[in-house]
Image (tube, rainbow, N blue to C red):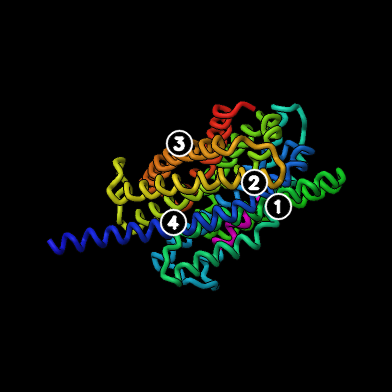
């Protein structure tokens, strides 16, 4: 009997500790997203001048999270497995991870520019290849140094403090990605508006030359681990980038309604990033447990997985209404049109709970399928999940808003 009580006490203690760590990380990320939401609201004038930026905004912000959250997840697994030490060194594994991030940044900046320009041409009949490619690529390159510093710093410091990096790396990295990407996105948009035709195409030529050099170097060097990261992640990142464009389409299609209630822009970053952070935490923890053998990759979730689902639902009931409260307050301060307070809370809570339901199913299925196929879940799960969350989450948020509040 005593052994049974002690066992239940240990289980409850571990559950509460994990929930507390996740709540703390999400709170930090949410507070940061308040800043991001404010920036988005203040940037509504630039957006109204060049509305095409809305089609790349979700993708550009999320791509930082996709690339660096995957890096953080890989580092967390490598630390748990003992393949690396929690410090910067000349370890070839660390070098390959840094090189992979640089290649992914340049590759995806170019890719997002091409895809977004095609979609925008179909929707608006305007060719903006140079502008959109300039915006996505410049944003990624400017964010690169600080994002690497934050990713390594958070992962290593939490591990050294005896905390689980999987609970902290994804929400903090995704928040930092948004906090950095959004101002840089608006700055890049402003630079595009002020740049000449020749300056834009000079940058595009430089970008293509750099990308060619990076790809040739990977092929010539023949590093298997680096190739594995690029080969496994690029199809996923490319698919995710396209999904992010769908999130952008939700904004572009409803651009007039969105700009009439510009206050809604203040909750978009926080809503999507809290959804992505919840999904990222869940993905990182399940991936680590699969690597360690704590759970089996089977269709019916084990008790351990169900406990992680419960944490996600509990956190969603707390965090999403907070985002609604913030959105109303900051919109009032900035004199932006916004739905009534009660309506906004109902919208964020309803949208968030629906989104969390999809998150838990998606994370688990992708994790176990990729693991069974011999693909590292750390390379594919987080990008797929966060991008799908952005695409689905944007539509859920916009259309739940339109259901409860007629613009």
**Residue 105 is covered by the magenta coloring:** yes
Nearer the observer, 95 or 401: 401
Looking at the image, is mark 4 or mark 3 earlier in the sequence? Answer: 4
The answer to whether residue 271 is above or below residue 121 is below
Q: Residue at x 45, y 53 (%)?
A: 281
**CA–CA distance in space, label 2 to label 1:** 11 Å
User: Which residue has dot 4 on it?
Assistant: 22
Kindly report the distance in space between the C-alpha atoms of the residues bearing marks 2 and 3: 24 Å
Tag 2, which secondary structure?
Answer: helix
Q: Where does residue 137 sit, x and y in percent of width and height?
A: 70, 49
In the image, the segment drawn in magenta is: 96-106
Write the residue at 65% across / 58% down: 144
Residue 354: mark: 3
Q: Position of residue 305 (x, y in %)?
A: 33, 49
The secondary element bearing badge 4 is classed as helix
Which sits earlier in the primary sequence, circle 3 or circle 1?
1
Instruction: Please tell me how crowded label 3 is: few (under 14), some (14-19), or many (20+) other residues with Cα within 10 Å.
Output: some
Lower position in the chain sequence, tag 2 or tag 1: 2
Asked whether the viewer can see residue 306, the reply is yes
> Which structural element holds mark 1?
helix
Residue corresponding to mark 1:
183
Rendering quarter of residue 340: top right
Residue underneath mark 2:
60
Circle 4 Cα neighbour tier, 10 Å, few/some/many (<14 / 14–19 / ≥20): many
2 vs 1, front mark: 1
């Amino acid at each position: 009997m005593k052994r049974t009580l002690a066992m239940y006490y240990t289980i409850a203690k571990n559950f509460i500790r994990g929930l507390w760590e996740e709540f703390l990380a999400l709170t930090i990320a949410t507070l940061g997203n308040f800043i991001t939401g404010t920036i988005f609201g203040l940037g509504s004038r630039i957006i109204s001048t060049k509305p095409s930026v809305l089609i790349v905004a979700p993708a550009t912000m999320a791509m930082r999270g996709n690339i660096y959250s995957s890096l953080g997840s890989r580092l967390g697994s490598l630390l748990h497995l003992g393949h690396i030490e929690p410090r910067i060194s000349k370890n070839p594994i660390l070098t390959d991870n840094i090189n992979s991030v640089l290649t992914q940044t340049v590759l995806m900046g170019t890719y997002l520019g091409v895809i977004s320009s095609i979609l925008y041409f179909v929707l608006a009949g305007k060719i903006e290849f140079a502008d959109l490619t300039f915006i996505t690529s410049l944003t990624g390159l400017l964010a690169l140094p600080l994002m690497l510093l934050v990713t390594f710093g958070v992962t290593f410091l939490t591990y050294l403090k005896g905390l689980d990096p999987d609970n902290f790396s994804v929400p903090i990295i995704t928040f930092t990605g948004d906090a950095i990407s959004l101002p840089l996105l608006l700055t890049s948009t402003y630079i595009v508006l002020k740049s000449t035709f020749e300056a834009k195409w000079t940058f595009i030529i430089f970008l293509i030359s750099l990308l060619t050099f990076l790809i040739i170097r990977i092929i010539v060097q023949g590093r298997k681990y680096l190739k594995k990261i690029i080969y496994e992640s690029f199809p996923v990142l490319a698919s995710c980038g396209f999904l992010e464009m769908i999130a952008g389409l939700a904004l572009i299609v409803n651009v007039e309604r969105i700009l009439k209630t510009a206050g809604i822009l203040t909750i978009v970053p926080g809503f999507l990033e809290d959804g992505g952070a919840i999904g990222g935490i869940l993905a990182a923890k399940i991936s680590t447990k699969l690597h360690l053998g704590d759970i089996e990759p089977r269709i019916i979730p084990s008790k351990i997985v169900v406990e992680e689902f419960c944490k996600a639902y509990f956190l969603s009931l707390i965090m999403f209404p907070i985002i609604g409260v913030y959105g109303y307050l900051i919109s009032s301060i900035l004199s932006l049109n916004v739905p009534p307070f009660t309506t906004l809370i109902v919208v964020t809570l309803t949208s968030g709970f629906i989104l969390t339901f999809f998150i838990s199913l998606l994370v688990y299925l992708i994790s176990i399928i990729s693991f069974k196929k011999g693909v590292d879940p750390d390379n594919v799960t987080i990008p797929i999940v966060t991008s799908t969350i952005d695409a689905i989450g944007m539509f859920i948020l916009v259309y739940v808003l339109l259901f409860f509040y007629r613009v």
